[in-house]
Image (cartoon, coloured by chain):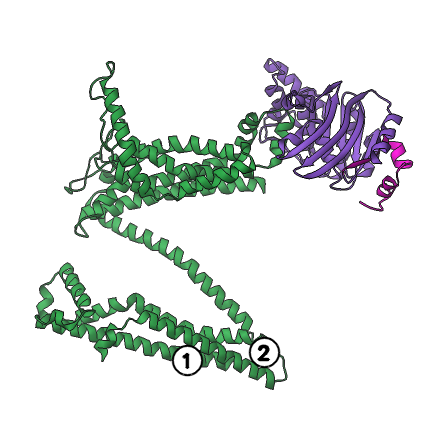
Chain colours: A purple, B green
Amino acid sequence: MPDTSSHSATTASIATATKVDCRNINVFYGDKQAIFDISMAIPGRSVTSFIGPSGCGKSTFLRCINRMNDTIENARVEGQVIIEGENVNTDAVDPVLLRSRVGMVFQKPNPFPKSIYDNVAYGPRIHGLARTREDMDAVVQNSLTRAGLWEEVKDRLGEPGTGLSGGQQQRLCIARAIAVSPEIILMDEPCSALDPIATAKIEELIDELRERFCIVIVTHSMQQAARVSQRTAFFHLGKLVEFGDTEQVFTNPTDDRTQDYITGRFG
Amino acid sequence: MLETFSQIPMAWLAFAALAAAGCAAFLAGRTIAMGIARTSEAQLNSQPNYHGYYVAMWTVTPAALLLLGHALFGSGLTRSLLMAELPDGFASFDRLQLAQYLDRVSEAATLDRSVWAGEPLFAAVTERYMILKGGLKLGTFLLAILAGLAGLAFATRRLQASFRARHEVERGIQLALFACAAIAVATTAGIVVSLLFESIRFFSQVPLFDFLFGLHWNAQTEEHFGAIPLFFGTFIISLIAMCVAVPVGLYAAIYLSEYAGARARAWIKPMLEILAGIPTVVYGFFALLVIAPAVRTSAVWLNGLPFIPDEFFAASSTNALAAGLVMGVMIIPFVSSLSDDVINAVPQSLRDGAFAMGATRSETVKQVVMPAALPGVIASVLLAVSRAIGETMIVVMAAGLRPQITADPTAEITTITVQIVALLTGDSEFDSPKTLSAFALGFVLFALTLVFNLVALRVVQKYREKYD
């Protein structure tokens, strides 16, 4: 039942070219199934948000896209995750390389215990993206600028990243993610540990970033989903209930459960 | 009568009596409280059981303290009483002779009379000793009973409806717990003070400078007390041990916390802990019987090689390398389990961050996890060093006794701990410089390990602030 509804929703409203095409994803943690046969076509150069009550599987589904579930013992992901025509959910694809194409920003800002500069330079270094010191400086400046942090930190690039404020740390993590020029950026509740002002800055940033990247964001705030995303997917109990244009999902949901959730009747 | 009383073992008797008195006092207190509850209009502040505990506490504690005091100081007191009464003939005895004489007396006092029948003077002294001992014992016992009764009377008189027995019992428990903690602290303080005291006596005979910076150690002849060779030996063996323990222990910890699956972890961790539980004497004879001969054989073989001068390696049958290697193996679990804890304390979010950037596991460990865990790892290494410095059994068995300064790891070498053992085993006078030097060495050892432990604690504390 949810399968058919999700399919009709996806096919009905594709505006931009599909970037990530997930087909029949099932995720198991040991014997427990967390995701039930979800298919979803995520468009490029736009923001897609995942909403739903806690434990509904939206983060788990997000982590399928860069195969972060591989790092969890006894987690098993079935199905196809097709990025630009290539299924990445197979042993033939190196998750380490995949993750240089699919960046991720986490719920709690997690800068490495290194300087601001080294935090941003981390990805380019391990992937060998910058040949000279000047190249690296340019990458770092460029990434920090795009993350809207350059003006605030340009005079203290040598200071530890952990010394920044929470909102700055999160923007540093975004700068770190975009420094390797990924195609897709996954954000797992990136604002849930931030105050409203820092949240507003991040949202503004997300809006700018969507011109260059495909962004997928998990959020608990429905206002945030409505503000920043063009597409919204509603998850419930490991199933995709509804997926469509944000405006349509929030104003005229096709499923009763979506209606109940966004009006605050459960969740 | 007092003589026979002196031979009765009192500890068990006293224990039984105290337990019985405690039970009786508890019942008495509870009954009184229940009586109050029945007759008085006001409600009891605390439950009857608490009144019982309170009365039992006051009955048992004073008596127990008296009996404990007797157990600790009774024989010393008896001996000094006896010494004061000894006839003039004993004036010629020096301290050691007198002590030995009194030891014989107290031993004879526990035996049958026929043992000392032959010596009238000895018999008389022993009889007197038994009377004194028995009298002291009986006196303590009676006093304890009186104290118990006094406590009982005091406590039962305080019982009334509004009495906060529960509160008082809580205070009693707090005091008892404090006493236990105080014993540990007092013991440490006592050891330090006695070490310091004896060390000062040693340094009044041997200059501090000669001890700390002298290059020649020969305590047996009581001429040379230069401890540098011992410090050097301790340093070399600890260094060898750390060269084994730090890399192996640290990599084991990294494997366990970053790579191993739940099943491998469940196997390997307990195995490592078993390694920590092996008695050091077992390591010691392993070092002596297996490793040391192997080192010697290899050294002899190396000496035979054409490009190495003959006798280049000392190839001693006990040697620094064997002791150091085995000690290193012994210390592996210390390093690994402490480092494992520290590495596990690094937040998972940092690892996720590195993985999400496309880092491999080893890159993540090297560039993100280890820098974050470094202070804790350093602390664990420092603790392991202090453990290596203080380790005794392995070096006693496998390192040898010859104090010398040499970079040759196959040579016989000696450490602070080995010398302490060597100095204090066998007959020796208690206040000769030879024996006292053991205290000075002990003090140095204590100071060294204390410094390492303090620094390690400091580092760990700083590290904790960072993540909590």
Residue at 37%, 57% (x, y): give it: B186
Closer to the chain start, of discs 1 and 2, is: 1
Callout 1 environment at 10 Å: few (<14), some (14 to 19), or many (20+)? some
Residue matched to label 1: B150
- Magenta stretch contains residue B169: no
Q: Is residue B375 above or below residue B363?
A: below
Chain ID of residue with mark 2? B
Label 1 and label 2 in one chain: yes
Say which amino acid is labelled 2.
Ser
Which quarter of the figure is the C terminus of chain A placed in?
top right
Tell me the magenta residue range. Answer: A238-267
Q: Is residue A107 above or below residue B83?
A: above
Say which amino acid is labelled 1.
Ala
Residue matched to label 2: B162
Nearer-the-camera pick, B172 or B317: B317
Residue B273 picture quarter: top left
Which quarter of the figure is the N terminus of chain A placed in?
top right
Residue B165 percent across, percent down from the top left: 54, 74
Residue at 45%, 40% (x, y): give it: B271
Label at residue A71? none
- Magenta stretch contains residue A247: yes
Residue B253 percent across, percent down from the top left: 49, 35
Report whether A249 appears left or right of B251: right
